[in-house]
Image (tube, coloured by chain):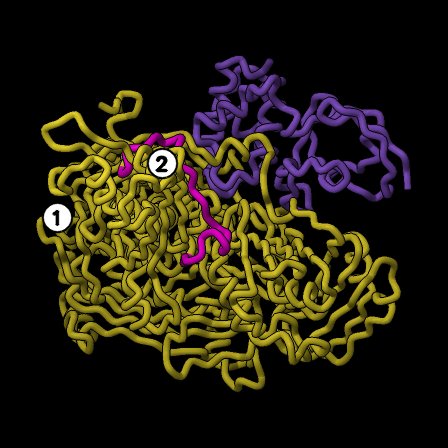
Chain colours: A purple, B yellow
Amino acid sequence: MTRITVKVDGSSFTDEVEPRTLLVHYLREQLGKTGTVVGCDTGNCGSCTVHLDGRSIKSCSLLAVQADGHEVTTIEGLGSNGQLHPMQQAFHENHALQCGYCTPGMIMQSIDLLADNPDPSEDDVRLGIEGNLCRCTGYQNIVKAVRAAAAAGGAQ
Amino acid sequence: MTTTEDRPATEIGNPRRRKEDARLITGRTRWTDNIVLPGMQHIAMVRSPFAHARITSIDTEAARASTGVVAVITGADIADEQGALPNAWAVVSDQQAPVHPSMAVDHVAFAGEIVAMVVARTAAEANDAAELVDVDYEELAPALELRAAARDEVIAHPDLGTNVSAVWAYDSAESGTGGDVEAAIAAARDGGIVIEREFRQQRLIPAFMEPRAIVVDPTTEQMTVWSSTQVPHFVKIFIALVLGIPEHKIRVIAPDVGGGFGGKLQFTPEEVLTVIAARRTGKPCKYCETRSESFMAAHHGRDQWQQVTLAANADGTVTGLKVELTADMGAYLGLVTSAIPLLGAFMYNGIYKFPSYHLGITNVFTNKTWTDAYRGAGRPEATYAIERVMDELAVRVGVDPLEIRERNWIKHEEFPFSTVSGLQYDSGNYEAATAKARDLFRYDDLRKEQAERRESGDPVQLGIGISTYTEMCGLAPSRWLGSMGYVGGGWEHAAVRMLPTGKVEVVTGTSPHGQGHETAWSQLVADRLGVAFEDVEVLHGDTQVAVRGLDTYGSRSLAVGGMAVLAAADKVIEKAKPIAAQLLEANADDLEFSAGRYGVRGTDAGLTLAELAFAVFQGHKLDGSAEGCLDADATLDPDDFSFPHGTHLCAVEVDTETGLSTIRSYVSVDDVGVVVNPLIVEGQVHGGLAQGIAQALYEEAVHDDSGTLISGSFDQYLLPGAPDLPRFETARTETPATTNQLGVKGVGEAGTIASTPAVVNAIVDALRPLGVTDVTMPCTPYRVWKAIQEGEQS
């Protein structure tokens, strides 16, 4: 077991983990951050996307020990004072989710996309979320939501 | 007077943002894998790597000794306990099927079949120990290729002696719904047109985003089963029937469910085995499949060969259609595996007035993952076949493919129309949908551009694909299901409960997994009862709450379940009437219900439903002449299906040098009748289009010569990402259904049914001058390039 200290959604945690533990399993099983989900075992689907020090990563592709000393933000850490993050609001307004399983990862990836490109074209958005799979929406309303969030200043 | 100004005039047609979103966008979700119970144990499955083999021995000693392991269970251990998994639809009385064990005992029939399970303290310990289970197999030759399997060249289940499960036929002459198709074909061979084609419906994988998961708590008075399923009510009754647990001792909950698309319309080996593990150990058990397991072991879809013969007069008027269908069941029959071809059987005639029709179906076993429902279930296959050959007919006659369709379709003034396959279409307006699609698509401009590109020999050719469709959905009238050999019914149940504070609880027997029933049913009830949308809570998916129900599939939820909700709401209004009359000291005949309130005609006197609910709660002033309760249940069994329809147009650019096909524009005009929530309907269409396009261009479950699924992950199975799909232009026409009180039709499968042939027709259209007359799906760049080479050689 290895001792790690990770700041997650604003709170600091120190835990013993097996070296092989994936970050997503640490988040879900030890911290109860079940808002972040697992959709595949090959790093393709992006359902488990979180932010590590402000940039999106697939938390199935990082070991928990690699997050030692870093800061993680999950879908549960978005928004403040009871207000939704503009990206969450945009997903709601634009019906950008159906079953909602890919949604946390999709939202985290979309926020990262706007950090790189605050005013993306439709093609920019489609390429920017290429690593996140959705089976319900055909992506059209997700693209619309991301661009709406951009217009609403969602990059901030 | 009660004010209604803060509510929209009607909720029907209001694009309400979904109630479901609040928890889904913030991560406050209730996926089955989120559930943690005291003392909960974890299960790992050991699966056969071979498609066909005998199990000669299983050594579990090392696994049992591994740290954290509570139990290792093999098929031999539970042979007398596990029962057999059910098939609920015998399509013929002499249907052949192997016994379907949840865990193989001595014979495995597909790669991925479960041969043992490990129960351990943690998931990691269970997985570690599963690696230590040592299974010896004697490999057998697998039956893999469908048409060879149909000839019994290699037998998938040696004990069965044949691969043929069922042979079923529909013939319009025999059924009295039309003429003799053989006579029509013979006549067409003499001066008319006969088109013969063979189409491959490749095997697809539903690939819902949430892998299947099950948690079983055996310590509760009713054993509680959480499952990521579309059909909690089915799971409850089948646990009772298969494992002999009394039905009233079982509670099944489908919490948040991450997609299904038919893939979670199943009663699974994993559900049975998790129950067995929990029962044997006396502790809560959880099983969560990996994506790799989901790919190989959750049921697949499609996988058919279709031989199609179309007969027509020289002017393109179709005189007959004959289809011979061979369908791959895979290794076993699941719940409705056997009936998937049957659900397409009545749809090959599409929107057309064909005078004669014959369909033959042969259901065949192979040593591959079992197939079953996948979005559209039989109807996409049927629509593909007819829409592909209608394009070929247009070429033979030398007219525009829209023109050939119009010559053959049912005119809007001809409804209701009895079809050659024996269904009655209640309504439709194919002219209106097609005109709208043509306009939005700028059809004539694109045809002009196509001609120019052909003229200039542009290496990137433009193709225009057309698809019209209708589908029988809203499964289904119980009487029809019974007449076709299905063991269950097709009714739906709902309850509406008026709470003392004026809030409303709605219980539905449907089980949504992305469809937004909480929102749409709230709209239905708010509209009918005159209460605020926000004041309605929709409850579902827990058999302790939604006691009766038949769940969600077959585009049935609104047309059947939603109408049951309305029926229950209407009963609430009826039950409130004598109470209002008594409290208002008025004659019931003088009361009228409007905007949530019973008023006495010609006066200001009245009581809202909320006031009546509180009066009933107190009971102080009731005289006992009427039941002191406003709550109502309703069960609704539809008289018939609903028949949505539409016209889809697709423009594809095909690079003739690389074979790459790129969708440039896609227009869908769907007629799903009256729409409750246009936002949800549009979303359903988008998702359906994506899955249909994926069949045309990207997805295929591929097995190697040993029967191993080599497209076994998202690395190899091309589920489209955002850059792989175009922007869709969707629109609607509205021809109300006459088979339910609101005029609604199903929408969940429409996009998937229509889009596949639209895309392939466009690719073939682009390449026709190069001698290409067909491309096998999925139309990968290699397949398209090869078709071009072969076309040029011919």
**Residue at figure coordinates x 43%, y 65% from the top left:** B304
Q: Return the residue nearer the eye: B121 or B96.
A: B121
**Residue at figure coordinates x 70%, y 70% from the top left:** B115
Above or below: residue B333 compared with residue A138:
below
Helix, strand or loop at mark 1: helix
Question: Residue B471: image x %, image y %?
Answer: 29, 54
Q: Return the residue nearer the eye: B514 or B444.
A: B514
Above or below: residue A73 compared with residue A24:
above
First of labels 2, 1 by sequence position: 1
Above or below: residue B226 compared with residue B534:
below
**Residue at figure coordinates x 16%, y 49% from the top left:** B406
Q: Mark 1 — on which chain does it sit?
A: B
Is residue B745 within the magenta segment?
Answer: no
Q: What kind of residue is marked 2?
A: Phe
3D distance between C-alphas at marks 2 and 1: 50 Å
Q: Is any part of residue B647 visible from this angle?
A: no
Q: Mark 1: give few (<14), some (14-19) or many (20+) Cα within 10 Å.
A: some
Q: Return the residue nearer the eye: B184 or B492.
A: B492
Q: Quadrant of the C terminus of chain B?
A: bottom left
**Residue at figure coordinates x 48%, y 69% from the top left:** B329
Question: Residue B683: image x %, image y %?
Answer: 40, 37
Question: Residue B336: image x %, image y %?
Answer: 44, 66
Q: Which residue is mark 1?
A: B412
Q: Nearer the viewer, mark 2 or mark 1?
A: 2
Q: Mark 2: give few (<14), some (14-19) or many (20+) Cα within 10 Å.
A: some
Q: Is any part of residue B362 visible from this angle?
A: yes
Where residue B132 sits, quadrant-wise, is bottom right
Where residue B186 sits, quadrant-wise, is bottom left
Span of residues in magenta: B528-550
Q: Which residue is mark 2?
A: B614
